Image (cartoon, rainbow, N blue to C red):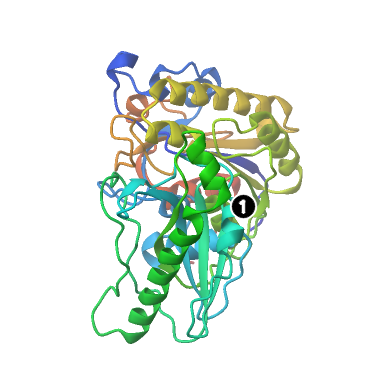
Amino acid sequence: MKTTRKAIMLIIDGLGDRPIKELGNLTPLEAADTPCFDRLAREGITGLMDPLSPGIRVGTDVGHLALFGYNPLKVYWGRGPIEASGVGISLKPGDVAFRCNFATVNDNLIVIDRRAGRIRHTEALAAALNGIPLGNGVRAVFRPATEHRAVLVLSGERLSAEVTDSDPGPSSEGEPLREVRPKRPGQPLAEKTAHLVNEFVRKSHEILQSHEINRERVRKGLLPANIVITRGAGMAVKMRSIAERFDIKGSCITGESTVVGIAQMAGFKVLTNEKLTANIDTDLEEKARLAVEALKETDLVVIHVKAADLMAHDNKPREKLAFIERTDGMLQTILNEVEHPNETYVAITADHSTPCSIGEHSADPVPVLIHGEGVLADSVEAYGERACARGGLCRIRANDFLLSLLDLMGATYRFGS
């Protein structure tokens, strides 16, 4: 069955939040002036969505896998392969990929900042690490990703993804760098891989500590990106594309490498350029322009914006609020310019909640809405966490949210005879 309707799905990364005293005990979304979102909520159907299931915190990768209609419990293979796809690396059988951060450590290898002061440009630093010799016939491919993020791929024989992270994890500043180990004892391939990763991390510190870019950062009072920390080891797994599953064409507009990777693996056409920074200075007008054009060629257009999540991680509720308002304006621009607005569904969601009060992902459900012809509108008057709790969608899971949207588009198939 071929879809006869088109749809926009707006993903506001880290949108969900908790009441904040300085905002009058409202969340940033509730306190924001969002006339477009609120109109869509009044005319559409709303609800709350768990990215995976109640009480489970998820990463950006798992949250987006679910939003793209996949069950992460069945298809998740680690962050590394997703990030590799996002920077254009095609994994071969046996390759092991890692999500990496440029980070800051002191002379005792205590982690000072897992993101090296949110360094924005790392191309030259990454080039200095690409191809580091590790021995054992293993080749190290290292590529920069979005801002402080990067990708390491180990290519060679007899490697394993069953290794732990050197990244000590969120809220770990002041803790020592972790040694990579096999996840279970008695795994010689994992022992070999862990040794190689530890060697790469050690050499990254030697090279980056004396790099001219870092010497200049120190002179300016900035944190040096003087080590690489690793996490999310994984090997390549093929996913069924959205065209194979639903016979529709999808496109995704994003500047964030993780989302680029997932979208490409899911068979979406990715639209990105240097104006899409995946930060507070991203060009939302450019995203609106790309979305309007993409709707002419594809059935489902996914628009991802990142900065609400970043502002929450940095405990900046007013900046998060302001970005939400800008995103509301972007969506209104799109709806003003699409060729057939009455024949286009609009869905708004998030990959997870990031409350400013904790500066990390939480398991709080996120508010969602779907607007368009045939939707059974509920009595909700505004788009916000507490308002959407009364919505007609009730409380659903992320992979069911996309299926609900696709069903309205006429793109799903009947189960049974």
Residue 151: horizontal and vertical position, in percent? Answer: 52, 60
Residue 254 in the image: above or below residue 326 = below
Q: How many marks?
A: 1
In the figure, residue 173 lies in which quadrant? top left
Residue 395: horizontal and vertical position, in percent? Answer: 33, 41
Please state which of residues 171 and 388 is positioned toward the viewer in this rendering: 171
The quadrant the N terminus occupies is bottom right
Query: In the rendered view, does 74 fall on the left or right side of 90?
Result: left
Residue at 43 percent of width and 45 percent of height: 115
Residue 415 in the image: above or below residue 317 = below
User: Within 10 angstroms of label 1, few (less than 14), some, or many (20 or more) residues?
Assistant: few
Residue 4: horizontal and vertical position, in percent? Answer: 68, 47
Residue at 54 percent of width and 70 percent of height: 132
Please state which of residues 269 and 339 is positioned toward the viewer in this rendering: 269
Residue at 61 percent of width and 70 percent of height: 90
Residue designated by label 1:
123
Please state which of residues 342 and 369 is positioned toward the viewer in this rendering: 369
Residue 313 in the image: above or below residue 380 = below
SS type, badge 1: helix
Q: Amino acid at mark 1?
A: Glu
In the figure, residue 130 lies in which quadrant? bottom right
Residue 414 can be seen in this image: no
Query: In the rendered view, does 315 fall on the left or right side of 146?
Result: left
Residue at 44 percent of width and 81 percent of height: 159
Residue 182: horizontal and vertical position, in percent? Answer: 30, 75
